[in-house]
Image: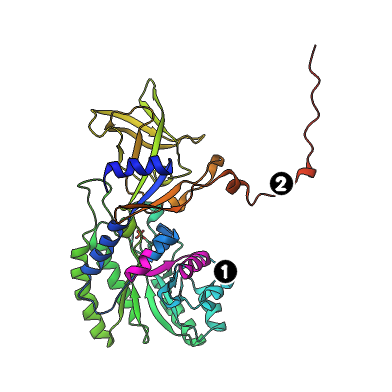
Amino acid sequence: MQRTDLLKIAKTYGDPVYVYDSEKIISQFHRLTNAFKGVKKLQLNYAAKALSNITILRLMNSLGSGLDTVSIQEVRLGLLAGFKPSDIIYTPNGVSLEEIEEASALGVRINIDNLSILEQFGSKHPNVPVCIRINPHVMAGGNSNISVGHIDSKFGISIHQIPHLLRIVKLTNMNVNGIHMHTGSDILDIDVFLYASEILFETAKNFDNLEFIDFGSGFKVPYKDGDIETNVEELGSKLTQRFNAFCKEYGRELTLAFEPGKFLVSEAGFFLAKVNVVKQTTSTVFASVDSGFNHLIRPMLYGATHFIENISNPNGRERYYSVVGYICETDTFASNKRIKEISEGDILCFRNAGAYCFTMASNYNSRYRPAEVLWHEGKAILIRERETFEDLIKNQVDVKELFAPAPEKATAK
Ligand SMILES: Cc1ncc(COP(=O)(O)O)c(C=O)c1O
């Protein structure tokens, strides 16, 4: 996709707007599949939370991906997008037994991450196979918000609780068909994956009827040209060897599962916003865009870096800018970055806007959420309309009779 295509999309569909390149999603899917081609049974379950537009889910389904879901609503979206229930895994955290039962009734695979629900679910539904999420106590991930496999994390069942876990499984007579871990996102060091995998293999030996081992995700993607990333090819070759050896030891060909989000969609996404104001201050030059952390919260939420390019002036000279949003709080996308000279009206392009961007967008400051466009086979296809004022008030109940307007104040003569 060229800069000119992006500019044309901004012109046609307005700004701000999210754009996703299907070709990049497809090539990332094939890259990961290829890296593990030595595994007999491989299952990639796309993590819907990263980007859950139904057309993107349909694209994943067409590639042969399964779906990793964390809420009953994501399960429903997956089914609506055409996934078979058996191709959906439901990995919630801290949800009610009722929600898990609802998902189970829809026929999807269930992944349980705490002993309390495991005991309750197993007692009521001993015939429903479950996968168990283990917390391997490994510190991994790009920052503390996305490091989820360590000892202080709320996720998974501690490896130190395996004896208790086994007692529950035995007493309820439930069938454990999979074990799972997810240690974090943005993991660069493949030794971390391999180390945590050994813990999973050790844990797996406690269960006789496993069908799959799910290694979660966490692959780090590049955030700009030449940036570092997880070497999935090296990981693929090392883990494949170890996994195949484990299957021999276990006595059965298991499925190796991953649930990538960022790896599949992060780089495929571009966020386009227009510069409203260029404001020189005593400390910097602010470029204020027609968006904010209501649309792209990652920089403010956890200091994520999104490379920003001025696609309206690709050949201009570089100057330093702080790119900020219009929200009524500190709302900084980037501080003092070199960007091609910016004029009011220019379109800035934020890279890596495919994962955890639109799905985290909100209506804060009563702003509309942006449109989403898919770039597919050389054509721009609208896959979500920009919101309107009607969308903003759709679910509000305007109880007019409750509060009458204040009486007119007498004005002094
Ligand atoms: C359980 C689980 N699986 C998969 C993912 C996807 O991770 P990533 O986007 O790093 O691939 C996440 C992300 O939060 C997760 O919590």
Task: From the top left corner, tell me how far across and down residue 294 is, in percent.
Answer: 48, 43
- Label disc, if present, on residue 398 of the rendered structure: 2
Q: Could you say which quadrant of the image residue 27 lies in? A: bottom left
Asked if residue 288 is positioned above or below residue 268 in the image, the reply reads above
> Residue lying farthest top?
413
- Label 2 sits on what residue type? Asp
Q: Could you say which quadrant of the image residue 151 lies in? A: bottom left
Q: Are marks 2 and 1 in contact (CB under 8 Å)?
A: no
Could you tell me how many numbered marks the image carries?
Answer: 2
- Identify the main secondary structure in magenta: helix
Q: Is residue 71 magenta?
A: yes
Q: CA distance from mark 2 to mark 1?
A: 31 Å
Foreground residue among 40 and 191: 40
Asked if residue 269 is positioned above or below residue 74 in the image, the reply reads above
Q: Is residue 366 magenta?
A: no
Asked if residue 282 is positioned above or below residue 155 in the image, the reply reads above
What's the residue at 26%, 67% (across, down)?
Answer: 195
Q: Which residues are magenta?
A: 59-80
What's the residue at 26%, 51% (across, down)?
Answer: 222
- Label 1 sits on what residue type? Ser
Task: From the top left corner, tell me how far across and down residue 137 is, in percent.
Answer: 36, 65
Foreground residue among 374 and 141: 374
Q: Provide the residue designation for mark 1.
A: 96
